[in-house]
Every structure is written in C-alpha cells, then in structure tokens.
Amino acid sequence: MAAQTVEVTENAPSVTLGAAVGLSCRECGERFPLGPIFACATCFGPLEVAYDLPSGDPEALRKQIEAGPHNIWRYAPLLPVPTDVAEKPNLNPGFTKLVKADNLARELGVTGGLYVKDDSGNPTHSFKDRVVAIAVEAARAFGFTTLSCSSTGNLAGAVGAAARRAGFRSCVFIPHDLEAGKVVMAAVYGGDLVGIEGNYDDVNRFCSELIGDPLGEGWGFVNVNLRPYYGEGSKTLAYEICEQLGWRLPDQIVIPVASGSQLTKIDKGLKELIALGLVEDRPYKIYGAQAEGCSPVSTAFKAGHDVVRPQKPDTIAKSLAIGNPADGPYVLDIARRTGGAVEDVDDEQVVDAIKLLARTEGIFAETAGGVTVGVTKKLLEAGLLDPALSTVILNTGDGLKTLDAVAPTSGPTATIRPSLDAFRSAGLAG
Ligand SMILES: *Cc1c(COP(=O)(O)O)cnc(C)c1O
C-alpha cells in the first residue's frame, strides 16, 4: 500500500468517537489525532485506534454489555463509535450464531469442543458488515459524502448496502472477474460498481492513487483511509465468541487470512477482554488459513520468514485472493507469539471442506469458509491443532455467493418421472 497521509491541520475540528482517544502507529507508537489517516507520518507504519477503555468493575461492564442490543453495538463502549450509535441508520450487523459443531467434531476427532462462528448470518452475508459499520461512523464524523473501497467481493456488497441505509453515495471497486453472486450483491443496492481489469492488488493500488488525487476528494475508502476504524469492527468477533462461550476464551481459533486485518483485530479484541477483566487471563492460540493459490502468509510462516513475499493469486477462494497482504507480517507475529500456525489448502480441499461442513452441520459456507475448515482438518492431521482443546472455526461468508465452487459436484441424486414406479426404480426408498 502506498504510504500516503492526509494532513490533519492544527486547527481542524477535533472529532470524538466514543472511547477512542487517537491513532497510534503500530511500528513506532507515535500518536495522532483521530482523522482519515492510515500511515504514520514518521515511519509509514500502519495506524490503529488507541483507547481510553472503561476501567473499574468488570461485572458492571459485563452487565451493561449483556443488556445491550443483539448486534455489535452492545460493545459500543469498546469501539470508536459515538455513544448514540445504535439509534443511527445502519445495518446493525453481528451477534451471529456460535454453533456447537458436534457432528463435525466427531468427524474430525475433536474432543475438546468444536464451534463454528457463522458470520454468513450478517445483513449482506459476510463478516464485512462488521468492519463497514464502524467505518461508516468514522465517515460520518469526518464529513465524507461518498463511501468507497477496494474489494475482493464481499466488501463491495457490504459498503453498497451500508451506504444506502446511512445516506451516503457509494462507488466501489472490484476485480472484473469475480463470482456472479458477488457482483450481483455488490450492484443490487444501487451505488456505483466499477470492475477493474486486474487482480485485487491492482484494484488496491488504483484506490491508493485515487485517494491522493482531487478525483477522490471527499471519499471515505473504508479499507484505505478509514482502515484503522474499519479494522476495529473485527474485534467484535472476539467479543461475541467469548461472550457466547460464557465469557471464556477459546483455546484455539482458526481464522481465514486475506489482508490479515481480521486476524490481527480478533487478537486485539481478545487482549482487550483480558485487560478489562471480562475473561480469565490464560493462553489462546491463533491459526491463520489461506488458499494454496494465494498463500503468501502461510508460505512465509512455514519457511520461518518474517517477510511476506507477494504472490499472484490463482484460487477459487477469491474473497481471500490478496497477493500482497497489508497485515501479513502481523499475522506471522501473532501466530508465532500465541503458538498457533498459518497453513493452506488447495482448491479441491476447499470444495471438500465446504461439503464437509454442509453435510455435518447444515452450514453452507463460501470458499473462505471452506479454506478455514480445510485448514482446520489439515492442522489436526499434522498434530498442530490439539483435538482435546476447545476450538472455534470462523465461517466468514455465505455459500450462495460462491455457488460455482460446488455446482459441478452438487446436483440431484436422481431425476425421474413423477410416478411411484420410477421412484422405486431409483432405489431411494426406505
Ligand atoms: C475479506 C474476507 C476475509 C478476510 O479478511 P482480511 O481481514 O482482509 O484478512 C475472510 N473471509 C471473507 C469471506 C472475506 O470476505
């Protein structure tokens, strides 16, 4: 990503976003006031939101959260959003199901408790509604009138829908060759949708140029100049998982990796819960999942490298097809620090895993979910995931958006004339 910053002038009106007190550089720690900036002016490191988190009685905070709405706004005290956020027009994502996956556990030999956090239940059927909801509040605070993004598909739909509901214009950018389900979802809300002749990394580079150009003035790119705020939305996955487990940390979490933002912010969310005293302070392990055809982070992990070398993506898991992941090095740090791993599976294993989850738990995941389930299976077989520990797998998107992945191998068992004789002959009775 190009290291560009937008100047925040001395006399710019100061913005308040809930408990957020500013932005801090993840590399050198330098602080900046809240604004639509994403790179450190000193070292070009990525910026993240810094907080003055509620101190005091964890029991009171837990009660306050539990009394909140059944969506991400129950965690508003821990997010960079205005205190009246729940009353504003938005899509209210989150509080998706945490499914105890006993059938899948039996199949995979997991005895310590296996759960699927099913984010396909969000308003536009992917986890991206969480991150967009936070970016929208930042966009409102900074006075942007157009919402934009570079997307591998799901983000474009989430931005289109959220923009419509919150009263923004939207213009979003995707690689030209995405799945039909993703393109339709990105277009149907009525904002502008632009297909770019290139892959995601080309789209992202284009958006970075647009931000620095007068053409992009007044535009909030949720995952570029609003990226520090956007990222915070993924913390809500950590909060929900722990709350749904009865305010307990899982032992192991398997998370798909595209840019790596989601994985790093789930880790941030877990650390916050520990710091706030909302969960017991004990170790957890974080695992990253990639598709073999776009595996820059797992390749670096397995080679023991600290540097993530960019790749040209070629995989059916298009939502994860980021060849030059912005948060790749942080994913490596977290996997290593927590004792986890980053692994990848090939396209055939992705399809098998989609079907495995569907036939064991009745959950139809998109290809990203197939990657995560497939990697979970592979890590168990390799002895890198402990089957005796509690494990949460993330399903981040809906299989209806990536039908092509399973369509060639999923069809009717038989096609018959409407007669009992024909049905008898098909051998399906009993
Ligand atoms: C965007 C996306 C991810 C990964 O997001 P990053 O934060 O970029 O790693 C995972 N799953 C689905 C379905 C997505 O759309």
Image (tube, rainbow, N blue to C red):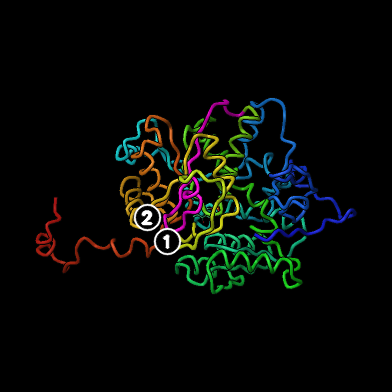
Please state which of residues 209 and 243 is positioned toward the viewer in this rendering.
Answer: 209
Determine whether, in the image, residue 171 is placed left or right of residue 371.
Answer: right
Q: Position of residue 19 (x, y in %)?
A: 74, 40
Q: Name the N-terminal-most of marks 1 and 2.
A: 1
Q: Position of residue 210 (x, y in %)?
A: 69, 69
Determine whether, in the image, residue 425 is placed left or right of residue 207.
Answer: left
Q: Name the residue at the right extreme.
A: 11
Q: Quadrant of residue 188?
A: bottom right
Determine whether, in the image, residue 55 is placed left or right of residue 14.
Answer: left
Instruction: Tell me the SS state at disc 1.
Output: loop
The residue shown at (73%, 73%) is: 215
Which residue position is annotated with label 1?
A: 315
Q: Position of residue 402 (x, y in %)?
A: 42, 62
In this figure, what is the number of numbered marks?
A: 2
Residue 112's place in the image compared with 97, above or below, is above
**Res. 252 in view:** yes
Residue interval drawn in magenta: 278-301
Determine whether, in the image, residue 157 is placed left or right of residue 369.
Answer: right
> Tag 2: Cα neighbours inside 10 Å, few (<14), some, or many (≥20)?
some
Q: CA distance from mark 1 to mark 2?
A: 8 Å
Q: Position of residue 31 (x, y in %)?
A: 78, 44
> Tag 1: Cα neighbours inside 10 Å, few (<14), some, or many (≥20)?
some
What amino acid is found at the position of numbered circle 2 in the picture? Answer: Asp
Instruction: Tell me the SS state at disc 2.
Output: loop
Which residue position is annotated with label 2?
A: 346
Residue 138's place in the image compared with 176, above or below, is above
* Beta carbon of the mark 2 residue lies under 8 A of ligand 1: no
